[in-house]
Image (cartoon, rainbow, N blue to C red):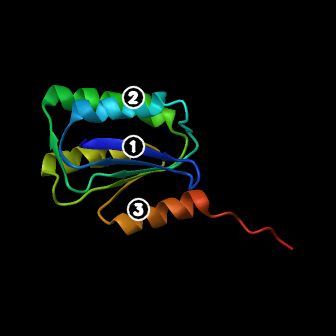
Amino acid sequence: MPCGYHLNQEDGLVTITGSGEVSLSEAISIGRELLDDPVFDPQLPHLIDLRGVEVEHSHDDSMEFREFVLQAYRPGVDASIAVVIDHSLDQAAVANLFHLSCAMEQTELFDQYDQALKWLMRREFVQTAVPR
């Protein structure tokens, strides 16, 4: 399966992954499936790993994807979202993801997996020290 997600309640993280050629309609389908999952917790941060993904898209698909992300997915997630990309995406896909990440609060785009994890950990898992 080129797209999938994993809800890890124990570690407190949702991961969404893709590999190979992925259509935007597949991405929307996975997003809807995730939001409708009975164990989905909107408080868990999301790590979206798009390394190795090639996006199949048309203008209409891009508009539908943007609408889903901004009107359903982002409002359905209360935590931070880190998106990891690499050189496998074409320039148009990178530009679209950059614009989407800028349009969403608490969302960042990364080209290094470890930096995305560090960002999520600092934002979501670090507790403030209690003064003595």
Percent x, y of residue 47: 42, 52
In this figure, which residue is indicated by the disc labeled 3? 116
**Residue in the picture at 55% in, 35% down:** 39
- Marks 1, 2: nearer the viewer: 1
Looking at the image, the residue that sits furthest to the bottom is 132
- Badge 3: residue crowd in 10 Å (few <14, some 14–19, many ≥20): many
Residue type for callout 3: Ala
What is the CA distance from the residue labelled 2 to the residue labelled 3? Answer: 23 Å
Residue type for callout 1: Tyr
Looking at the image, the residue that sits furthest to the front is 1
Q: In front: 91, or 26?
A: 26
In this figure, which residue is indicated by the disc labeled 2? 32
- Badge 1: residue crowd in 10 Å (few <14, some 14–19, many ≥20): some
Percent x, y of residue 19: 22, 49
Secondary element at tag 3: helix
Secondary element at tag 1: strand
**Residue in the picture at 59% in, 53% down:** 10
**Residue in the picture at 42% in, 42% down:** 104
Q: In front: 8, or 99?
A: 8
- Badge 2: residue crowd in 10 Å (few <14, some 14–19, many ≥20): some
